[in-house]
Amino acid sequence: MHQELLKYLEMYHPQIAPFMHLQINEWGKNRPLEGVKILHHVPLVPNTLLKIAALVAANAEVTVTNPASFCQAHPDAITCLHKSGIPYVENLDLLRDETFDVYLDCGGQLYQSLGRPLRGAIELTGSGDQYYRSLKTLDFPVISIDHTMTKQLETVFGCAESSHQAIQKLTGVDPTNKNWLIFGFGKIGRGLAYFCVEHQVPVTVVDSSVHQCDLASNLGIESIRPEEHDKLEKAVAKADIILTATGGKNIMSKYPRAWFDGKILGNLGLHDEFGPNFTSQDVLYDKKPINFCLYDPTPMIFIDPEFYLHNLGCLLLLQGNFPRGMHDIPEDIDSSIIKDWCQYHRRSEKSIRRWFLTSQDFSLKTN
């Protein structure tokens, strides 16, 4: 492996990235992706380099891109790829004449830009999962990791860490001394609420789903539905920090703009959730997901198993006989990763599962 990549393996050492180091070591021995052409479309930040290193160790032919619609590729990561001889392509249009066996996709963007892959795709995100499931016809298999507990290590506990760090970095304000209002109580919204509960910060969540509001109440969190206009107006007036994590576009522009004057506003979704009534200056980090202002948008300890699973999806796809359409990660694989993660990091599996959405919750079309 190139010396430039090895630097990042030292930076993100096995104590904080045990899954990626395990995958790199195993795949370096048996090279299970020999000759497989992979297009890798995941936010390109320094810790993503370990994920790419595992694919290189597996002897895959990797081309790297970046979902620029919501995050910029980190210059350090780009430099590392160039020095390591790994192709990095900024503009997806330049790949229109190429074919790839597998897409490691984010937001369904590769399929929307380039058409279908030869073998299939592994989808990383909730927005991509929703996009692929919304298609009337899908003529290749897509494995989504979005409904896994492994994914929720990132969206719940990783988000809890990165969101408050981002707010503090962008504003200089200590978020533990403020009242929070969270729009959306899906995977990311739960992470924001988890931070507040852990730090005894006043928090209210807004969600259109009665089921989601019930889940919030079960965790001792006050909830409001958007149509409860008077309650919502009072909650906005009381809040200092207002964050969005609904997965929708422009959802905040349906409310009176004056409500939000003087508030700290931030987006955690892939789309612009504030919409045309709010300028880029009104919302932290130009409306982009605020955690991407950090060197590590998600702490490696929480995204390490997700990287492992997203890569593993390639093997599942190539070794299995998946028909066209959407497929979830097998529950036994997901549960095994959670068990191992808790052992590695000395966490209580029972306590973290309390904050996870279940397969039943996902079947009710939660965000």
Image (cartoon, rainbow, N blue to C red):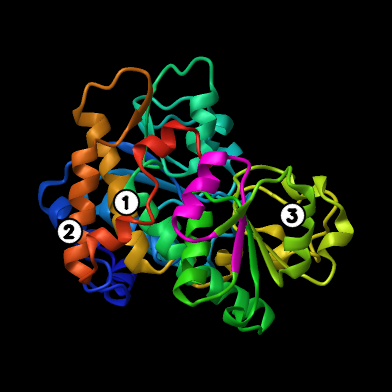
Residue 124 position in % (x across, y down): 42, 44
Q: Which residue matches tag 1?
A: 150
For label 1, the SS is: helix
Q: CA distance from mark 2 to mark 1?
A: 11 Å
**Residue 186 got which mark?**
none
Kind of element beneath mark 3: helix
Query: Is 332 on the left or on the right of 196, as rendered?
Result: left
Contact flag, marks 2 and 3 (Cβ < 8 Å): no
Q: CA distance from mark 2 to mark 3?
A: 41 Å
Q: Give, as a three-letter code, the residue at label 3.
A: Leu
Q: Is residue 342 visible?
A: yes
Q: Which residue is mark 3?
A: 232
Residue placed under numbered mark 2 in the picture: 340
Please identify the residue farthest to the left as the structure is shown: 29
**In percent of the image, x 54 and y 68: which residue is there?**
163
The stretch in magenta equals 203-221
Q: Earlier in the sequence, mark 2 or mark 1?
A: 1
